[in-house]
Image (cartoon, rainbow, N blue to C red):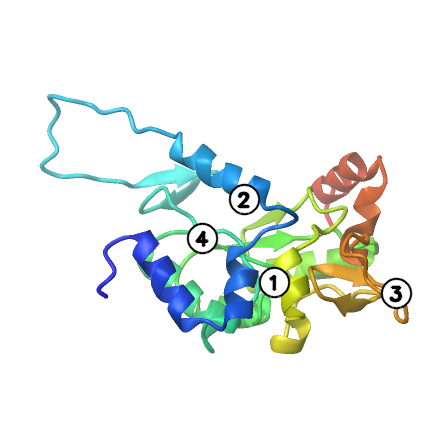
């Protein structure tokens, strides 16, 4: 099948990927209600037509947070691209550069932020989880700055990792599949379903993520934001 739209590419990916990897990429948490709502919400966005205008030369260039891009489409942060292809985020970064847009690199990328920056042809931003150790988080921010990343995209909605039931059924452990060289160090062992549980104790599928556990405190959002603005 020759793909002509994104849905065609999605179907081809399902044919080529191992079922457990496909479920990891395509699935969501719990009953996946939010996943379905996100797709429905996107489909409710309509383009307002403009008539009687010159469309002989169409230019989609714009800016995002003062960053020029060739089109209003950015590459969102997603984990472990090497599950789909050995080149992983390296290939994604090259493609983003050729397309003239921004790639937001995940903290859980399968290549280090320096390796991605070395091959990137365009601007990079770094997605960041807040580690319980501000010094550890600050070290990663400084690494990103040294590697040429221009912005930090802070994840604020993960004080608890969702119960990813597809991963639980598949016994899927991402750390067993690919290396995650930039991922912040954890204090607990990895368990299926996107959860973390103390060694020797069974995972319930809803334990707090140690990588974000400081954000479970009510004051985390404000204090972390002020700390970032004052410089990591």
**In 3D space, how far apart are the residues under numbered discs 3 and 2 (Cα atoms)?**
28 Å
Indicate the secondary structure of the residue bearing disc 1: helix
Measure how far apart labels 1 and 4 are at the Cα level.
21 Å
- Say which residue label 4 marks: 75
Residue of label 1: 146
- Quadrant in the rendering for residue 54: top left
Of badges 4 and 2, the one in the foreground is: 2
Between discs 4 and 2, the one toward the N terminus:
2
In three-dimensional space, the C-alpha distance between marks 3 and 4, rounded to whole angstroms, equals 34 Å
Residue tagged 2: 35
Q: Is residue 64 above or below residue 20?
A: above
x and y percentages locating residue 71 in the rendered image: 32, 44
Front of the two marks 1 and 3: 3
Name the residue at 57% across, 69% down: 114
- Secondary structure, mark 3, is loop
Write down the residue under mark 3: 198
Q: Is residue 64 left or right of residue 229?
A: left
Q: Position of residue 165 (x, y in %)?
A: 66, 56
Q: Position of residue 70 (x, y in %)?
A: 31, 47
Please tell me which of labels 3 and 4 falls first in the chain: 4
């Amino acid at each position: 099948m020759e793909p002509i739209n994104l849905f065609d590419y999605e179907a081809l990916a399902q044919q080529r990927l191992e079922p457990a990897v496909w479920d990891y990429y395509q699935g969501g948490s719990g009953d996946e209600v939010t996943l379905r709502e996100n797709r429905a919400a996107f489909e409710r966005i309509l383009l307002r037509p403009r008539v009687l205008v010159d469309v002989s030369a169409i230019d989609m260039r714009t800016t995002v947070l003062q960053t020029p891009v060739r089109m209003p489409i950015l590459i969102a942060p997603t984990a472990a691209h090497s599950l789909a292809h050995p080149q992983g985020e390296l290939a994604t970064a090259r493609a983003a550069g050729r397309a003239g847009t921004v790639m937001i690199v995940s903290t859980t990328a399968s290549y280090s932020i320096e390796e991605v920056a070395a091959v990137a042809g365009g601007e990079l931003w770094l997605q960041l989880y807040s580690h319980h150790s501000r010094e550890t988080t600050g070290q990663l921010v400084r690494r990103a700055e040294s590697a040429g990343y221009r912005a930090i995209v802070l994840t604020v909605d993960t004080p608890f990792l969702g119960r990813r039931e597809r991963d639980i059924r598949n016994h899927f452990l991402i750390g067993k599949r690919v290396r995650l060289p930039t991922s912040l160090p954890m204090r607990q062992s990895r368990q299926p379903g996107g959860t973390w549980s103390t060694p020797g104790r069974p995972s319930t599928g809803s334990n707090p993520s140690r990588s974000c556990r400081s954000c479970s405190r009510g004051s985390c959002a404000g204090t972390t934001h002020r700390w970032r603005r004052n410089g990591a």
